[in-house]
Amino acid sequence: MEQLYQHFRGEERHFIDQVLEWKESVLNQYSPKLIDFLDPREQEIVSSVIGENTDVKVSFLGGVDETERKRALLYPEYFQPEKEDFKLTLFEVQYASKFVNLDHRQVLGSLMSLGLKRSKFGDIRFFQDVVQLVCASEIADYLRANFQEIGRAKISLKEKDLNDLIPLVEELQELVTTVSSLRLDVVGAAIHNISRQKMQPLITNGHVKVNWKTVESVSFECREGDTLSVRGYGRSKVAVIEGKTKKDKWRIVVHKQK
């Protein structure tokens, strides 16, 4: 077990234990197990823990191929997963788009205020004035009945086919920079070209996420593959840590959303 843990951060151990329980459940019951929506880092961990060529397989689906948040289906070798097994529902939000502008935080905040868990929702997509969200089918009826406003805007939901999900358009800019350490405040400041003094309160006030989890420690150590999200500044990924320069600085390659 320690050998498995050493590949992950300490705070990820609890989730690893949960994945092992899911795996055990599939082995014992010899039937598939559907998991709520997982962020990309959680999907990586599940794939890694389940591994390949085992008695338990795993597949992910969040609507269409390029979704970020996906449900996981763990299943025995005999089982052939179909799209329907993932129990996904796509809704389009109907609202007075001429008078109201909606953003991701408003939509998610209103969903959370219904007492639902984030893990019951997949991607929330925007294109011009179209807003869509993917949810677990088991809460679809509850949403239809109770999700009637976002902020002060009255809304209704229209179910759509999953293939109608708005495509994800991501433009990435590659940035190569050097940093004195891999601390979150140092890396974040370098990526967004701001001072550490400006970066530190963003972290301590809970405005920074690493791998989709809020991190409030300025000295948190970044690793290769980490996705950083800073409220108001956007998202980036530490794609490669190339090693140290002659001046003893870390040279990193970052993929930054435009």
Image: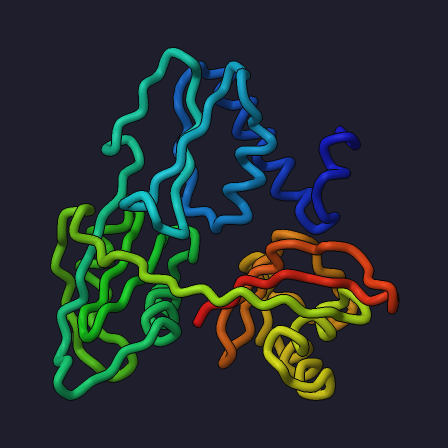
Instruction: Judge whether 50 appears above or below 115 on screen.
Output: above
Residue closest to the far top: 78
Please indicate whether residue 52 sits to the left or right of residue 107 in the image: right
Residue 234 x, y percent position in the rendering = 49, 73
Instruction: Judge whether 160 appears above or below 52 on screen.
Output: below
Residue 35 x, y percent position in the rendering = 43, 38
Instruction: Judge whether 80 appears above or below 243 on screen.
Output: above
Residue 220 placement: quadrant: bottom right
Residue 156 placement: quadrant: bottom left
Please indicate whether residue 230 sits to the left or right of residue 62 in the image: right
Viewer-proximal residue, 89 or 64? 64
Q: Residue at x 12, y 80 (%)?
A: 96
Viewer-proximal residue, 178 or 106? 178
Residue 10 x, y percent position in the rendering = 74, 48
- Quadrant (top left/top right/bottom left/bottom right) for the N terminus: top right
Residue 242 x, y percent position in the rendering = 72, 54
Instruction: Judge whether 194 appears above or below 108 on screen.
Output: below
Q: Residue at x 68, y 69 (%)?
A: 177
Q: Residue at x 87, y 69 (%)?
A: 247
Please indicate whether residue 21 sits to the left or right of residue 77 in the image: right
